[in-house]
């Protein structure tokens, strides 16, 4: 990563999510979704699946630069984004300021480590979004039911770990799988982006 240099010093790296009036700036080495058109549809679809209200408090785990966090903030009372990469968290905070979004906060926390001291983990949330890397989100699943989360959208770049974590959510944590599907984020490859909706059982 340290060898990455800009070819044009004046060029700004950013992309737009017009449906939410959000512009997201990023650095050359930052993780972003590579397919702009599908990403826009994916973000809109995830926000729709969350069925947000102005009273919702939302937890966005593996939030990156705020790809889902900031659109969620447009429709919820408050959203907390958590990400292990401090650089991405810094960019997420900058993007919140850039878009004049004041109801989003971000924390840099290793989501694969111990979360006992995380300042947000004892709060209550009504809904959550997970967008983990290929290794999945098994380590944070127990936190979801403890936090009172009733509705959960899980976005995954690896259907195998999504299937594994879905089994845990249903069997161990009291959630029901309501729907699932795939998005062709990577045309002409064997890879897809998956999305699933869970709800706490009655």
Image: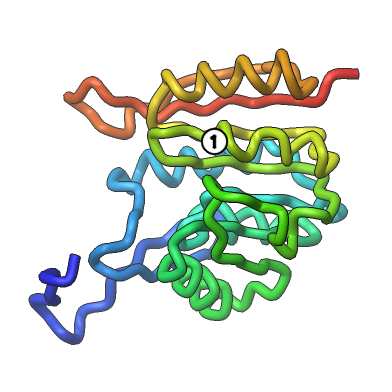
Residue drawn at the location 76% of the way across and 61% of the way down: 78
Q: Which type of secondary structure does the marked residue at label 1 adopt? A: loop
Give the quarter of the figure containing the N terminus: bottom left
Q: Can you see residue 18?
A: no
Is the image coloured rainbow, by chain, by secondary structure, or in one colour? rainbow
Point out residue 56 in the picture as x, y percentages from the top left corner: 82, 51
Give the quarter of the figure containing the C terminus: top right
Q: Residues within 10 Å of mark 1 (few under 14, many from 20)?
A: many
Residue to which mark 1 is pinned: 137
Residue drawn at the location 64% of the way across and 73% of the way down: 101
Asked whether, in this view, residue 129 is left or right of residue 21, the answer is right
Residue drawn at the location 73% of the way across and 19% of the way down: 172
Residue lying at the far bottom in this picture: please name it.
Answer: 10
Task: Depth check: give the residue in front, 176 or 35.
Answer: 176
Q: Is residue 109 above or below residue 46?
A: below
Task: Depth check: give the residue in front, 77 or 63.
Answer: 63
Q: Quadrant of residue 32?
A: bottom left
Residue lying at the far right in this picture: please name it.
Answer: 202
Asked whether, in this view, residue 82 is left or right of residue 133, the answer is right
Q: Is residue 138 above or below residue 132?
A: above
Point out residue 21 in the picture as x, y percentages from the top left corner: 54, 64
Q: Can you see residue 190?
A: yes
Task: Depth check: give the residue in front, 50 or 60.
Answer: 60
Point out residue 64 in the picture as x, y percentages from the top left corner: 47, 57
Residue drawn at the location 25% of the way across and 63% of the way down: 29
Task: Depth check: give the residue in front, 186 or 128.
Answer: 128
Asked whether, in this view, residue 73 is left or right of residue 91, the answer is right
């Amino acid at each position: 990563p340290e060898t990455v240099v800009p070819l044009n010093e004046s060029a700004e790296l950013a992309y737009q999510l017009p449906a939410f009036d959000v512009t997201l700036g990023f650095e050359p080495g930052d993780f972003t979704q590579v397919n702009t058109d599908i990403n826009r549809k994916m973000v809109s679809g995830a926000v729709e699946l969350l069925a947000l209200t102005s009273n919702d408090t939302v937890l966005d785990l593996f939030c990156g630069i705020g790809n889902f966090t900031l659109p969620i903030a447009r429709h919820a009372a408050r959203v907390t984004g958590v990400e292990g990469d401090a650089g991405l968290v810094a960019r997420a905070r900058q993007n919140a300021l850039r878009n004049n979004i004041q109801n989003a906060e971000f924390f840099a926390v290793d989501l694969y480590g111990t979360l006992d001291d995380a300042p947000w983990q004892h709060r209550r949330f009504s809904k959550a979004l997970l967008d983990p890397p290929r290794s999945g989100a098994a380590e944070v699943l127990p936190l979801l039911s403890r936090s009172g989360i009733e509705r959960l959208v899980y976005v995954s770049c690896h259907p195998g770990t999504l299937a594994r974590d879905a089994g845990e959510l249903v069997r161990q944590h009291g959630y029901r799988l309501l729907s699932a599907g795939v998005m062709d984020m990577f045309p002409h490859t064997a890879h897809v982006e998956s999305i699933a909706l869970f709800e706490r059982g009655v």
